[in-house]
Amino acid sequence: MRYFIIEEDKSLGYTGFVSAGHKWGLPGVICPACKATWADTGKAYPSVDLTPVAALARFERPGAKPLEEYERMRELVRPLLPPGAVVGPGSSFGPRVGSAQGRFGQFVSNYSDVLLVRREALEKLQAEGLRGLKGCRMEVRFRQRHSPELLELELLPVGRLHPRCLPPNRESPCSRCGRESLALPKQPVLDAATLPPDLDLFRLLDMSTLVICTERFTEACQRLGLDGIVFVPIPTEG
């Protein structure tokens, strides 16, 4: 099986842009051990409704909090997560709220870690039997008369980069908060042993801004004429 990184296709002249953030989120953390103030990006679960616990913490306010407060908020969220979800400082939840305008393709990827899709395109892909495609509604106001119905794809973090493409002298994760300082390699390689056998679309656990798809997903998009994104091959190693 071959794999690909999904990126925005800027060659088609689409002007569509979505400016919206998720309704709720976990804060960043201030770690007493490594002294870092940090948050992760990419771990987003738009299907998760935090209304049942919203009165117990201020999930709508971004920023960093002491590690103990973050951990308390994280435990409130855990029972509401979908199977396979992994959260960390900065994880976000609920529908995207904001505005949008312009001409949109079948897929929209204004940011590297976000993948939006028209409802009709998602339904075509689901009819092809592709696995792991979950579209979530958004609360986005379009500044135009004729607007598409865009859904945000909820992507589970699964799989890792192969150690061969990472610096051999990189720092170990913090034993208290789990922070790992890891930059995207110039030539990323996937660790084949960690890749999911039952998903055609996912993001990486250790580099969650990368959206990865299988060859099956790529071929289906090309066969159906779904545009807005390009597929960059990424090698695997066992």
Image (cartoon, rainbow, N blue to C red):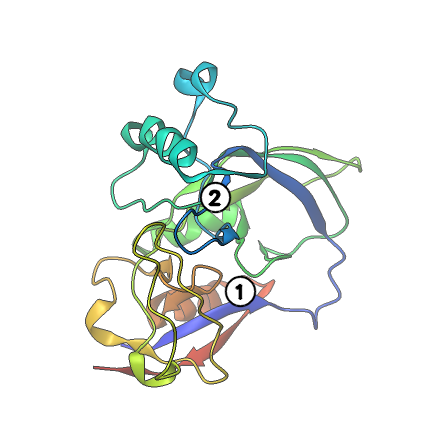
Residue in the picture at 35% in, 72% down: 215
Answer whether residue 119 is visible to the viewer in this image.
no
Residue neighbourhood size for the residue with mark 1, other residues' Cα within 10 Å, grouped as few (<14), some (14–19), many (≥20): few
Pick whichever, 167 or 95, lies toward us. Answer: 167
Tag 1's secondary structure?
loop
Choose mark 2 or mark 1, whichever is in front: 2
Q: x, y (%) of residue 44?
A: 46, 44
Question: Which quarter of the figure has residue 74?
Answer: top left
Tell me if residue 189 comes above or below residue 206 in the rendering: below
Residue neighbourhood size for the residue with mark 2, other residues' Cα within 10 Å, grouped as few (<14), some (14–19), many (≥20): many
Q: x, y (%) of residue 24?
A: 52, 31
Please name the residue that numbered disc 1 is placed on.
225
Q: x, y (%) of residue 29?
A: 47, 44
Please name the residue that numbered disc 2 is placed on.
29
Residue in the picture at 75% in, 38% down: 146
Pick whichever, 214 or 38, lies toward us. Answer: 38
Tell me if residue 70 comes above or below residue 15 in the rendering: above
Tag 2's secondary structure?
strand
